Amino acid sequence: MDAVADLFQRLLRKSAQPPSDDLKTYLRTLFIDFPAAEPDLRSRVHVRADGSVSGFLGVLPVEMEFEGRRLKAANCGTFACDDRDGDPFAGARLLRDVLSGPQDLSFTETSNDVSTDMWRTTRATVLGPYSLEWLRVIRPSAFALEAAAGRLSALRLLSPMTRPIDALFCRRGEKQSWSHYAPLAGKADAFVIDAVSDTEFAHLCRQFVRHFPLRPAWETPMLETMLGHATRKALHGERIQHAVKTRSGKAIGLYLYYGDPGGIGRTVQIMAEPGQEAIVIDCLIRNAHARGLVGIRGRTQPALLQAMIGKKCAFLHTSSTIVHSRNPALLEALTSGRAFLNGLAGEGWTRLIGDRFG
């Protein structure tokens, strides 16, 4: 585990600092002691001839369901390989070893360009509609400053200067604009936003995911465990976990995002009753605006892409969602957008994305 933590720190966190005990403990909690762990579906390390570890592929077992049948899936998110010059095929061997396991389906939502090339050599499929990030600018000048401050943090000292500029932008016109967001009267006014507990959120996740033919077979205790992992993402800000409900109290959707005033929010999950996705997205963006965020972003799914038409969202590619299966029916469900992936059905809920390790 020390060697794996070192790979993670150097190659994925891009840090020269030695890995902390907190990181080592969390990697063990996630990849060895996780409640869903199965003896025949484990993470792998690549070992050199001298016994040292040169690569790691983290595997999280996921139980899924398709047309009434339970399936085993391998969530292959954390992938790091060292010494590409000395052993350029170590990563490919590691990936092929994992994909040869007993699972019906293997996938990742965090594949970079190098990893994507490796997956493609195994005849895996890149899912384009699941591989985009959506971005909604809320306060344009503050957004530009915050984006630039990612490279030079001292620029945040100029943030008071952006407020009058953004106030002027947001008063213009009565239609939504690509450059800024202003809450307007609409269908979302008929719904209420309600902060919910992990237990209620888990119950609603199980309710909304049933509409997908290929989906995680979540049980409430497992979802509550995952949401417990998602409690803190210090690099992304405060956790906001809401249900969207009718005035009579019926839930039609939910969202989970992180963000602080003046920052760019990161959305982990949006779920909704079929046909209600646009309302839930409107409620999410309204809430981000009310809390003082300068922008908000998240990962796409096919149903969300349809609902975002007209929302003035930009789309960009930062990592790929990739699947591998020898079952043609599963591949058809995935490529046709009838599967639920990303977010809670991925790696976005773990502390590895968005948290500090002290």
Image (spheres, rainbow, N blue to C red):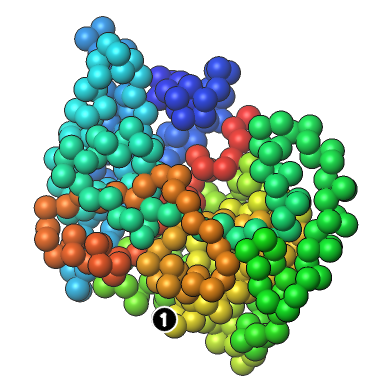
Whole-percent x, y for residue 342 in the image: 40, 56
Q: Quadrant of residue 331?
A: bottom left
> Of residues 128 and 109, which is closer to you in this image?
128
Report the residue at 30% width, 67% height from top: 337
Residue type pointed to by label 1? Pro
- Bin the neighbour count of mark 1 within 10 Å (Cα to Cα): few under 14, some 14-19, many 20 and up: few
Residue positioned most to the top: 50
Residue positioned most to the bottom: 248
Q: Quadrant of the C terminus?
A: top right
> Of residues 215 and 30, which is closer to you in this image?
215
Whole-percent x, y for residue 261 in the image: 76, 54
Q: Quadrant of the N terminus?
A: top left
Report the residue at 58% width, 18% height from top: 17
Left or right of 127, for residue 239: right
Question: Above or below — where is 338 with respect to 343?
Answer: below
Whole-percent x, y for residue 68 in the image: 20, 73
| One can see residue 40 in this view | no
> Considering the numbered disc 1 on the image, is that residue within a helix, a strand or a loop?
loop
> Of residues 106 and 150, which is closer to you in this image?
150
Which residue does the numbered mark 1 point to in the structure image? Answer: 274
